[in-house]
């Protein structure tokens, strides 16, 4: 089992920012001797998962493109994240939604409902214009700059602010790692929204705890802590340890 852990540690060293790595860089990253790392990279190269260029730097092979194509067709994000959402409902007693961006809309992908008599009514497939609500702000805050340019101007019309003002809001959201909104999407509802990270650090989904505003007063920090825990767990399911580390770093600890 230790060998398997080490193999995946080697593969986890690679990212968009570090697409090629030297043997020494890999050894330093995983904290193993160069000789041990050499055996691991040699085995991965022999099995076709790593390639080594003329400059002696390693990179992931095209085998991962094939595996990614299979994963994209077989992994149901909703099924993958339902256990995390259920735990968040249990921890907070409130409805939890999984959200993504589709065009100029925030799309509700999945819902885990609260068992309380008064709860937020959200439905899978429900759309809200980008800019309205905390989920939109979180998803937009972590978009690639080019993609954000395509949606930011229409979003300003929804929340009636300038592009400059919305950029400032998104900068704050990205810096703190979450969004808290009151009545942004639906009057009378508040939302605590946190990003879910993939192995490449990108955010394509977010979780929101949706609470009747009358119940949120005095409980925001507790809700944030529960949401942060879910974001780390959900990111791990989407992108492994690297993604969960990113979530921990971006979301802080909410102890203040």
Image (spheres, rainbow, N blue to C red):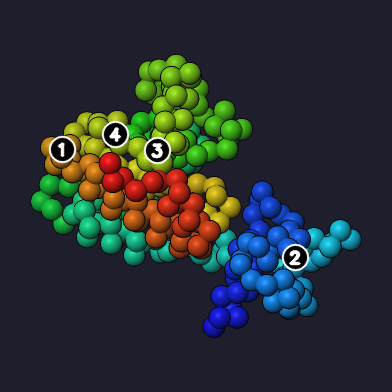
Name which residue lies at 34% across and 61% down: 84
Q: 10 Å neighbourhood of mark 1: few (<14), some, or many (≥20)?
A: few
Front disc: 1 or 4: 1
Tell me which label, 3 or 4, sits earlier in the chain: 3
User: Which is more N-terminal, label 2 or label 4?
Assistant: 2
Where does label 1 land, which residue?
217
Within 10 Å of disc 3 (Cα), the crowding (few <14, some 14-19, many 20+) is: few
What number is the disc on residue 181?
A: 4
Residue assigned mark 2: 23
Mark 1 or mark 2, earlier in chain:
2
Could you say where residue 239 lies in the image, as x and y percent from the top left? 52, 59
Mark 3–mark 1 distance (CA, rounded to whole Å): 20 Å
Say which residue appears at 89% left-offset and 61% top-offset: 54
Secondary structure category for the residue under label 4: strand
Residue at horizontal 66 percent and vertical 48 percent from the top: 17
Q: Are marks 2 and 3 in contact (CB under 8 Å)?
A: no
What is the number of callouts on the image?
A: 4
Front label number (1 vs 2)? 2
For label 1, the SS is loop
Mark identifier at residue 176: 3
Q: Nearer the viewer, mark 2 or mark 3?
A: 2
Distance of label 3 from label 4 (alpha carbons):
14 Å
């Amino acid at each position: 089992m230790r060998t398997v852990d080490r193999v995946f540690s080697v593969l986890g060293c690679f990212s968009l920012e570090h697409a090629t790595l030297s043997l020494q860089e890999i050894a330093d990253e995983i904290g193993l001797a160069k000789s041990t790392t050499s055996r691991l990279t040699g085995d991965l190269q022999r099995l076709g998962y790593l390639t080594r260029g003329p400059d002696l730097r390693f990179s992931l092979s095209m085998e991962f493109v094939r595996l990614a194509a299979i994963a994209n067709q077989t992994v149901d994000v909703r099924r993958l994240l339902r256990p995390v959402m259920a735990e968040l409902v249990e921890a907070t007693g409130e409805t939890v939604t999984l959200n993504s961006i589709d065009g100029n809309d925030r799309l509700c992908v999945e819902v885990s409902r609260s068992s309380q008599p008064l709860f937020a009514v959200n439905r899978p497939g429900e759309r809200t214009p980008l800019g309205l609500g905390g989920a939109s702000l979180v998803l937009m805050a972590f978009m690639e700059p080019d993609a954000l340019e395509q949606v930011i101007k229409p979003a300003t019309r929804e929340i009636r602010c300038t592009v400059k003002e919305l950029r400032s809001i998104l900068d704050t959201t990205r810096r703190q790692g979450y969004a808290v909104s009151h009545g942004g999407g639906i009057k009378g509802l508040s939302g605590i929204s946190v990003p879910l990270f993939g192995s490449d650090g990108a955010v394509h989904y977010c979780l929101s705890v949706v609470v009747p505003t009358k119940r949120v007063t005095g409980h925001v920090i507790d809700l944030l802590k529960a949401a942060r825990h879910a974001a780390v767990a959900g990111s791990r399911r989407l992108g492994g340890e690297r993604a969960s580390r990113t979530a921990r770093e971006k979301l802080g600890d909410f102890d203040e």
